[in-house]
Image (tube, helix red, strand yellow):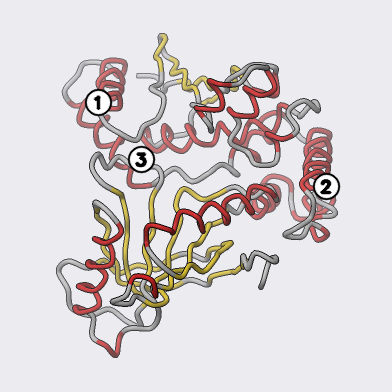
Amino acid sequence: MEANSLRIRYTVHPQQFVASIRTSVANREDILKKIGELMGEIPKESIQGTPFCIFYFVTSVADGIDVEYGVPIRSEFQSNTITFRTLPKMESFSMSHKGKLDDLGKAYEKVFQYAYKYGYPSQEFSREVYTHISGNENEHEIEVQFIIHPWNSLLVENMIRELGAEQQGKIMEGLQAIEIETPLEQKFEWLIGVLHKLENVTDESQRYNIISGCAHFFPEEMVIELRQVYEKARENTHTLIEAIDKTLEFMASHKGWGSLPIRKGNVLYTTKSPANPKAFVEARTHLERIKAYCFCPIIRNFLDQNVSVTFCNCGAGWPKQLWEGVFRQPLRIVLVKSLTKGDEECQFAVYLPGE
């Protein structure tokens, strides 16, 4: 589907079975070289699509760019180096770029600006599809994809789970009228209406379960990595608190973990970093600061309009995924500070399990 005059397309991508390799690279020239090597390893009769590369934003990779490059295939074949997996269904905004790799940034800028203009959050990765790679770099054809985080779909699923399909339909009435280029103001008004109706029929626990389940997906491999660090620390220490402190030391000394949580007694206080650190530092007013701080492409434009605190449970879903994954059990997580409360940061209290 053609989304606009900029030739930005909206596409639903079905599941794809792929052969891929995840690694770190120094630059895009390395990616093209490695894709060529991968194509040479795959039997020609197995190839079923165009090569691609996924760029991971949240990563513990210290050197280079964390990527997964691959090719859609029909079936597995013998290999000791290639991973076979099914990419999930995705939605994207995309734009075709023709020309040098150094100019790809212009296409990315246009696609991301378009998505944010209409209130769409990104997944924690982007993707490129290599339609045509030429010996002449001016003739490269690459599709740049902004992968959409499925916030509304998760909201539907979570409401049905907590409240049932009938109640979900009543609360989210009007969703069908929300289109790709529906103005941001109209999307905001619909969302605020949903939150108010939700508050009228739920308790605090239900609202938390519904909205926190809409959060961005914390990378599973990083959850597993931190769980292993914690479990090893737990084996070599006398108490849970000692093991937690060792885990926090690991996070402080390795890339990708964001703002380091602060432990006070049996509670971890985790605070988000600003979405736009430069704009946050340069902001002159409270409204400019919180707009630069907020990650939500809808809410951040209307933070001066009495946004419901309920919405910020979405932010709790990020530490929830990490720490519940580390401890392998549900945890109590409380919103301590939020932009919707008038604060200039969002902070969550993660209550650690008992010994």
Q: Quadrant of residue 92?
A: bottom right
Q: Amino acid at mark 2?
A: Gln
Dots 2 and 3: beta carbons under 8 Å?
A: no
Dots 3 and 1: beta carbons under 8 Å?
A: no
- Horizontal and vertical percent position of residue 269: 47, 18
Q: Is residue 101 above or below residue 215?
A: below
**Image quadrant containing the N terminus:** bottom right
Q: Which is more toward the observer, 228 or 218?
A: 218
Disc 3, SS: helix
Q: Which residue is mark 1?
A: 253
Disc 2, SS: helix
Q: Is residue 177 above or below residue 133?
A: above
How many residues crowd around disc 1 within 10 Å: few (fewer than 14), some, or many (20 or more)? Answer: few
Q: Which mark is residue 223?
A: 3
The residue depicted at 16 percent of the width and 23 percent of the height is 236
Disc 1, SS: helix
CA separation, marks 3 and 1? 16 Å
Lateral position of residue 208 relative to residue 262, left or right: right
- Horizontal and vertical percent position of residue 216: 53, 44
Instruction: Of the two numbered discs 2 and 3 on the same chain, state the one appearing first in sequence.
Output: 2
Q: Amino acid at mark 3?
A: Val
**Name of the residue lying farthest toward the top:** 265
- Horizontal and vertical percent position of residue 5: 69, 66
Instruction: Of the two numbered discs 1 and 2 on the same chain, state the one appearing first in sequence.
Output: 2
Lateral position of residue 294 relative to residue 253, left or right: right
Q: Amino acid at mark 1?
A: Ser
Q: Which residue is mark 2?
A: 186
Lateral position of residue 350 relative to residue 178, left or right: left
Dots 1 and 2: beta carbons under 8 Å?
A: no
